[in-house]
């Protein structure tokens, strides 16, 4: 099969590699019908995650058809259409029993595309298949379905839920990438009085308005007004940048919440000298994807309109072009780039 293989920092290519096979009785092999690129894939490609070894197939989000299952897979059959979760869950360890699937200590967790071969390929081996896939409803488009692998659960679980977004809240989202904009979409389920997006990219600020933000502005005046006034009830930090975190601490009100969902590859300064008296709650976390079935029903029945997050679709063999498009998203406005099997 063909797959996008990581060869070291700034080096990846669309190579011919062996087809995946069943290695454990709980595995399934899935033919990839649609996959996409995440900001963490860019971190890997830059060499920010040394645990990812050269020779690894990248990617952790996919939708496809089951082609083979191991002997201990009970809920799937060849021919089933599934969403492949970005988080692999053994289903039996204490973390999984507590539905903290991202912290699985039974051999799962965030392993696809990092510790084992991932989804940016024609085929992918999915470990713990019964607990790491979701049946795809027949009326759910692939471009919407692939967002349920990671983007929407991250926005909800790590951003909206951890931030305790509630009716009447003023919500500020720092960073208008795909996850930040997904947080805008999901937060509207909880009736905030106003949602404001802050970013340096004019193209992405325009996208934020299109998907339903009440305001979208450059940092500066907006943050100054928030820090000098009442402040935001909830700040969702989705930029993954040190400056974005500092902006979040300035924008939040006394007694408010900062939910950090951006993947931080560099240290960020925590100004406790100005925060300790504000009774601020700061949450971090990794997506568990336990909310995927609930979110899938909301998308399926039109309660979540997510199609605008997909701005480009390409053939699967144009994976390297897709990385180029996605990496220039702040300048061009590109958000999720979805690749389809031809």
Image (cartoon, rainbow, N blue to C red):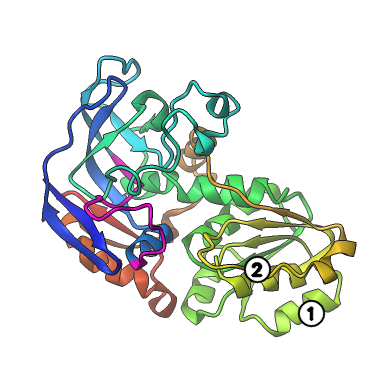
* Pointer 1 residue: 225
Q: Residues within 10 Å of mark 1 (few under 14, many from 20)?
A: few
- Is 34 magenta? The answer is no
Looking at the image, which residue is at 49% across and 20% down? 92
**Residue 67 found in image quarter:** top left
**Residue 240 found in image quarter:** bottom right
Task: Give the CA separation, mark 1 to mark 2.
Answer: 17 Å
- Residue at the outermost bottom position: 221
Looking at the image, which residue is at 56% across and 70% down? 241
Of the two numbered discs 1 and 2 in the rendering, the one whose residue sits closer to the viewer: 2
Residue 126 lies left or right of residue 38; in this view the side is: left
Looking at the image, which residue is at 38% across and 32% down? 133
**Looking at the image, do the residues carrying marks 1 and 2 touch, with CB atoms under 8 Å apart?**
no
Tell me the SS state at disc 1.
helix
- Residue 34: mark in rendering: none
* Pointer 2 residue: 245
What are the residue bounds of the magenta stretch?
A: 46-63
Residue 95 drawn at (x, y percent): 56, 29
Q: Residues within 10 Å of mark 2 (few under 14, many from 20)?
A: many
Q: Nearer the viewer, residue 203 or 191?
A: 203
Residue 329 drawn at (x, y percent): 39, 72
Name the quadrant of the N terminus: top left
Residue 294 drawn at (x, y percent): 54, 34
Residue 98 lies left or right of residue 36; in this view the side is: right
Vertical side of 46 occupied by 81: above or below = above
Tell me the SS state at disc 2.
helix
- Judged by its main secondary structure, the magenta piece is loop
Vertical side of 206 occupied by 49: above or below = above
Q: Nearer the viewer, residue 221 or 240?
A: 240
* Pointer 1 or 2: first along the chain: 1
């Amino acid at each position: 099969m063909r797959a996008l293989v990581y060869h070291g920092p700034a080096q990846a290519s669309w190579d011919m590699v062996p087809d995946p096979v069943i290695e454990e009785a709980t595995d399934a092999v899935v033919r990839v019908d649609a996959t996409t690129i995440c900001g963490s894939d860019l971190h890997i490609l830059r060499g920010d995650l040394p645990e990812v070894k050269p020779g690894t197939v990248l990617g952790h989000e996919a939708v496809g058809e089951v082609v083979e299952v191991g002997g201990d897979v009970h809920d799937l059959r060849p021919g089933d259409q599934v969403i492949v979760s970005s988080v692999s869950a053994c289903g039996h360890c204490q973390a999984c029993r507590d539905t903290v699937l991202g912290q699985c200590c039974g051999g799962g967790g965030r392993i696809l595309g990092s510790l084992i071969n991932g989804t940016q390929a024609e085929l992918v081996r999915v470990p713990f298949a019964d607990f790491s896939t979701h049946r795809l409803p027949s009326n759910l488009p692939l471009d919407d379905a692939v967002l349920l692998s990671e983007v929407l659960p991250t926005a909800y679980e790590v951003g909206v839920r951890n931030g305790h977004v509630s009716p009447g809240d003023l919500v500020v989202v720092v960073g208008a990438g795909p996850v930040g904009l997904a947080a805008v979409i999901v937060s509207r389920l909880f009736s905030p009085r106003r949602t404001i997006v802050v970013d340096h990219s004019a193209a992405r600020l325009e996208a934020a308005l299109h998907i339903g933000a009440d305001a979208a502005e450059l940092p500066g005046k907006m943050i100054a007004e928030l820090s000098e006034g009442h402040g935001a009830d909830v700040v969702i930090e989705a930029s993954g940048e040190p400056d974005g975190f500092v902006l979040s601490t300035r924008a939040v009100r006394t007694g408010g919440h900062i939910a950090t969902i951006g993947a931080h590859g560099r240290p960020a300064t925590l100004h406790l000298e100005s925060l300790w008296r504000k009774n601020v709650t700061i949450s971090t976390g990794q997506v568990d994807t336990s909310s995927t079935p609930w979110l899938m029903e909301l998308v399926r029945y039109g309660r979540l309109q997510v199609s605008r997050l997909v701005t480009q679709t390409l053939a699967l063999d144009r994976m390297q072009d897709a990385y180029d498009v996605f990496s220039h998203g702040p300048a061009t406005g590109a958000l999720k780039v979805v690749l389809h099997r031809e």
